[in-house]
Amino acid sequence: MQLKLKDIKKDPRINSFIDQTDKYLRSLGYTDHGRRHLDIVSDRSKMLANKLGLNIKDQEITSIAGWCHDMGNFLGRTQHHYWGGMLFSQCYINEADPGQVSRIMQAIVSHDKDDLKILDKITACVIIADKSDVHRNRVLNKNLKEVKADIHDRVNYAVTDNHLRIDKQKKTITLSLTLDTKFTNIMDFFSIFVERMNYCQKAAEYLKYEFHLNINKTKLA
Ligand SMILES: [Fe+2]
Ligand SMILES: [Fe+2]
């Protein structure tokens, strides 16, 4: 059996992991890691895979890895990438093509932390899609006073527009953000996002692209 994103999205096992993760991370006061984030990562990683010329099967694998990448958080934030990969395997290793399952596991496990090892373009696409998702809509706390007091919330809240573009001719992947400086400043942004931007750069390098960052129409990287 070949796995398809539309079927994975309907799978009650995957949906229960996503629901439990959403509940768990909300209780910790984290930004959104639920279906809004997963949809963006899945769509963006598939868009990158498509523009990079990956075949249809690999584009599907990329979108599935994007959809499932954070579902292991409810078992522990620190190792959530490993939990996610293992949960995916438990669900599908006996019912789907093992080659497809293991490549999706690899992308889920490699999307985060120091364990990051980029072995293929699928993983690189998921990393860029995940780490580039910074936006006001990720902030779940509706209390503006509390949002301003928390640097993660403040920086996400300040981003009112977010576009990711890939230029095949120039070999560039560009993240353009609109930052509302009433809520944060560039230094806050960098103190939170330098690590994420490094991941994006590393993933882009693997793809033999340059990663660029524009904030308020100014090229910063
Ligand atoms: Fe993650
Ligand atoms: Fe994520």
Image: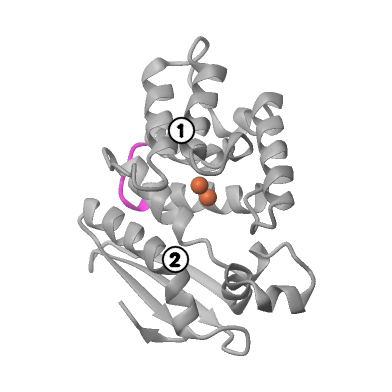
Secondary structure beneath label 2: strand
Q: Neighbour class for label 2 at 10 Å: few (<14), some, many (≥20)?
A: some
Q: Is residue 67 visible?
A: yes
Identified at 37% across, 29% down, the residue is 103
User: Percent position (x, y) of residue 98?
Assistant: 40, 16
Residue 7 or 65: which is nearer the viewer? 65
Does the magenta portion include 51? yes
User: Percent position (x, y) of residue 69?
Assistant: 51, 40
Residue located beneath label 1 in the image = 82
> How many numbered circles does the render carry?
2
Identified at 43% across, 39% down, the residue is 62
Residue 192 vertical position relative to residue 145 in the rendered view, above or below: above
Q: Which mark is residue 167?
A: none
Residue 148 or 221: which is nearer the viewer? 148
Residue located beneath label 2 in the image = 164
Occupied quadrant, residue 105: top left
In the image, the segment drawn in magenta is: 50-55
